Image (cartoon, rainbow, N blue to C red):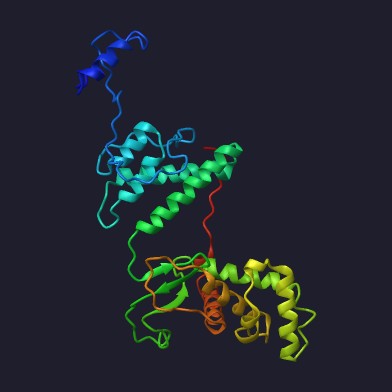
Amino acid sequence: MGIVIPSQVEKKELDKNAKKIKRKKGEYAQQRLFFKPRTNLDGRKRYKWGTNKDVYPSNVANPLTCKVPSFVDFVETKETRFFFYMLEDWDFNKNTSPVEEELSCRALLHWRLRIFTGLVNEDEKKIIKFYLKTASKIIDDTMPRKNFWPYKDGLVHVYGQKKDLTYKNRNKFADHITFNEEQPFIFYNYFNEIKNKLSQYEREISRESNLKKKEAYWTRTFQVIFEKSDLPDKIFFKTRFNYQNIDLVTASYLSWKHNSIISHKKEPKRGLVSDWKLIYSLYKELDALRIKSPNLFSENKIMVTSL
């Protein structure tokens, strides 16, 4: 059964090119030869490399549903702009088709694996990195959140949490900063990474008891081993650092790093800030948790040999 031709102009165009594609006059292929996107393109953002088809994920097949029409457009045209439009249109509050959800994950996984395995040239690598970064931003902007805001350093901002009566949470407020309980190893490893970096310079100052001398030493050391963009100002070094030991120096620096991260535009503006006391207490809590539940600190790594 042939497809319906909505326009006589399109019919003439099909017949004119019938010989070129080895098809008899009046026979029309079972596909949308004259593609009209299901997605409304009015006022849509024009994404860079949005019409590029060179890095289309080979592990994505034709979806079985049309609940997210722009994803069908993505599969039919292989133009990545429709993948981005799908992410923009996705209603994360409703249960969508598991088929489309799986195919979306496949597309992102395909691009990530191509980067990891090096099966790309430099131009393709640049395009794929842009696609991944753009997809991440769209998802971050559109996904609904309630009271849990994760940060890249492994800490999270929690808002409006009901306070329980346990001794552990006796000093926690409804709005507070803590570590990501789903991935506690992120902040724990980050703390140790910075601590190990600073430990190389600790020997020269470890026996010094004068805090003024310690302040001068560590201020100078930070200026040597870190880029200027990764340094707090002199006032922070003077008023917000604790120089008593390497753990507290690390905690002081990480408190500044966390507070300097630009919060998401949708995050509640409650003025949550960290200090060295909070950072150090979270690190000690994680250190104890690692001994009690070491399985929580095992990172799942996937070794990829081919696509």
Horizontal relation, residue 118 to residue 94: left or right: right
Q: Residue at x 53, y 67 (%)?
A: 153
Question: Quick check: 94 above or below 74?
Answer: below
In terms of depth relative to the viewer, which is nearer, 11 or 114?
11
Q: Residue at x 56, y 70 (%)?
A: 188
Q: Position of residue 78 (x, y in %)?
A: 40, 34
Q: Residue furthest right?
A: 204
Q: Residue at x 35, y 57 (%)?
A: 142
Horizontal relation, residue 121 to residue 223: left or right: left
Q: Residue furthest bottom?
A: 210
Horizontal relation, residue 29 to residue 263: left or right: left
Q: Position of residue 287 (x, y in %)?
A: 56, 76
Residue 119 visible somewhere in the drawing = no
Quadrant for the N terminus in the image? top left
Q: Residue at x 46, y 76 (%)?
A: 178
Question: Quick check: 219 above or below 67?
Answer: below
Question: Quick check: 261 above or below 281?
Answer: above
In terms of depth relative to the viewer, which is nearer, 284 or 151?
151
Q: Position of residue 61 (x, y in %)?
A: 37, 34
